[in-house]
Amino acid sequence: MTNDNNNKGKLNSQSINATPLLFAVFIIAICGIIYELIIGAISSYLLGDSVKQYSITIGLFMSAMGIGSYATKYFRRNLFDVFVTIELLIGVFGGLSAIFLFAAYGFTNIYYLVMYLTIIIIGIMVGLEIPIITRIIEENENNLRITIANVLSFDYIGALLGSLAFPLILLPHLGEIRAAFLVGLINISVAILIIYKYKGFIKNLYLMKFFAFLFALLIFIGFITGNYTASFIEDSFYRDKVIYRQQTKYQKIVVTKHRDDLRLFLNGNIQFSSIDEYRYHEALVHPAMSLSKELKNILILGGGDGLAAREILKYGNKVKNIVLVDLDPEVVSFCSSNPLIKDLNNNSLENEKVEIINTDAYKYLEDTKKKFDVIIVDLPDPNNEALNKLYTNLFYRLIYQHLHEGGFVAIQSTSPYYANEAYWCIRNTVESEGFFTNGYHLNVPSFGDWGFTLASKESFSTEDIKLTIPTRYLNNDILGSIFYFAKDEKKSQDKVEVNSLTNPVLLRYYQKAWSSY
């Protein structure tokens, strides 16, 4: 009690202006929530299953904050020194947190350990902040009711601003590594603000100034060189040389090249290899195009690389209009301007028949009144909750409503060998909405054994498929074989549930399968 009273008496003998402290609360609240989002985003990007990663991050972070809050009762003197020290430590450790996580994934096998330790350490320090600053203000104003109301108000408002700033500004423009450095620099700036505004209350003033300058310089250098650091670490994730990278509002685009092998990755998942992509895209497009009664109006959901559109344009005057719906305009822009990919897709994205709409495929189907002769579903695998929505019964119900009688749908459906349950879940979910279906698969060396679902409102025979356009892989002889499945590829055919928005079983099947690889 004596130490507390002495400290309180010192504060009261020199009245302080609490406004900078409340401003500090506002800023540190922004920083705290952004650290959570950075860790959750990196873990989701590297490991998949964003709900799981964010749940672990938030739950562990909040628990660690509780530990930090509890520990503040042991700090009785020199609270300004304590607060400045906390801000400096958060600034350094938080600023380096993204590098720690990426490096742990790229160069070690202890990612989860590093992730958990990062969350706990930052969480404990964030938990120390608000109770310490509340005590400083309360000891000066001597009105706990007003102090708590003010502090928590600024804390909650700051948290809201941080949760909006990260996805809308920081992630698209800076990426995770530079965003972490910037937020760390902000924490150190708060420490510097407190040092200069309340230097009369800081016992170890010169020591605090020294470390504030040192840490600010360290983190500032990290921020300036963040792109080079990110490139160095990220290059270790890929077998071939990275020739292009971009963080868009929606995803990370990476392109690698080795001799004639050009590869496009979205969020670390390969989308195509130039060496064998024709196998995938010929199989995706031509069975449906061959069977459909009309080919005038075609819808491509996904396919922002223009490779499916390239195959459709082979049908010449039979095709009048192609609507290509891809969420990310940056992917479409890159694939329609990069010379290497333009050469690969035959400049299909700039063809006058192709109408590009950048929106969510689900929303497009909800809003449009158009019907189509052929619908090509060329979407990434359902490895997160947002993509899972595009493999649900409701999504296929929308497709059914927008398909002309006699029309066909072709859906990329992941691997029937590596992800057997996921493949048959997609097939059964399509059938649950009244479609007649048939499945087929083939070997795409970059992917392995890859599967597709062919669907129509009417029963059909795959023996009616006749190729009339030039291809590199498919021919009328091989078409008969791709519709047969081996016993081990049919083992889950009758054992899986239908995928829905309220029961996203496909996501579980998919993650269970690919976790082994």
Image: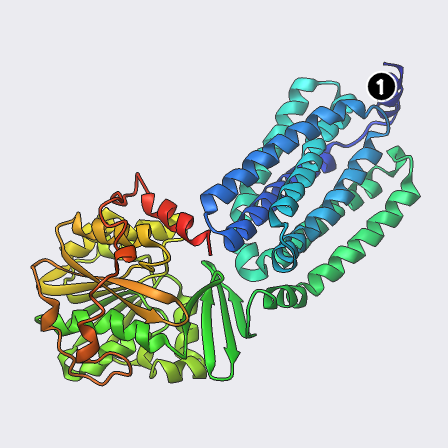
Q: Nearer the viewer, residue 397 or 108?
A: 108
Residue 75: x and y, percent?
A: 81, 26
Q: Which residue in the rendered view is the most extreme toward the top? A: 1
Q: Which residue in the rendered view is the most extreme toward the front? A: 487
Whether residue 452 can be seen here: yes
Whether residue 27 can be seen here: no
Residue 96: x and y, percent?
A: 70, 52
Residues packed near mark 1 inside 10 Å, few (<14), some (14 to 19) or many (20 plus): few
Q: 483 left or right of 176?
A: left
Residue 196: x and y, percent?
A: 83, 43
Which residue is pictured at 24% across the width and 50% down the height? 493
Q: Which amino acid lies under the numbered mark 1 shown in the image of this protein? A: Asp
Q: Which residue is mark 1?
A: 4
Q: 460 left or right of 44?
A: left
Image quadrant occupied by the N terminus = top right
Whether 371 is drawn above or below 132: the answer is below
Whether 362 is drawn above or below 373: the answer is above
Which residue is pictured at 84% across the width and 53% down the height? 214
Which residue is pictured at 32% across the width and 77% down the height? 278
Please identify the quarter of the rendering in which residue 71 is found: top right
Q: 380 left or right of 59?
A: left
Whether 307 is drawn above or below 346: the answer is above
Residue 222: x and y, percent?
A: 72, 60
Whether 164 is drawn above or below 139: the answer is below
Identify the element where label 1 is drawn: helix
Color theme of the render: rainbow
Q: Nearer the viewer, residue 362 or 202?
A: 362
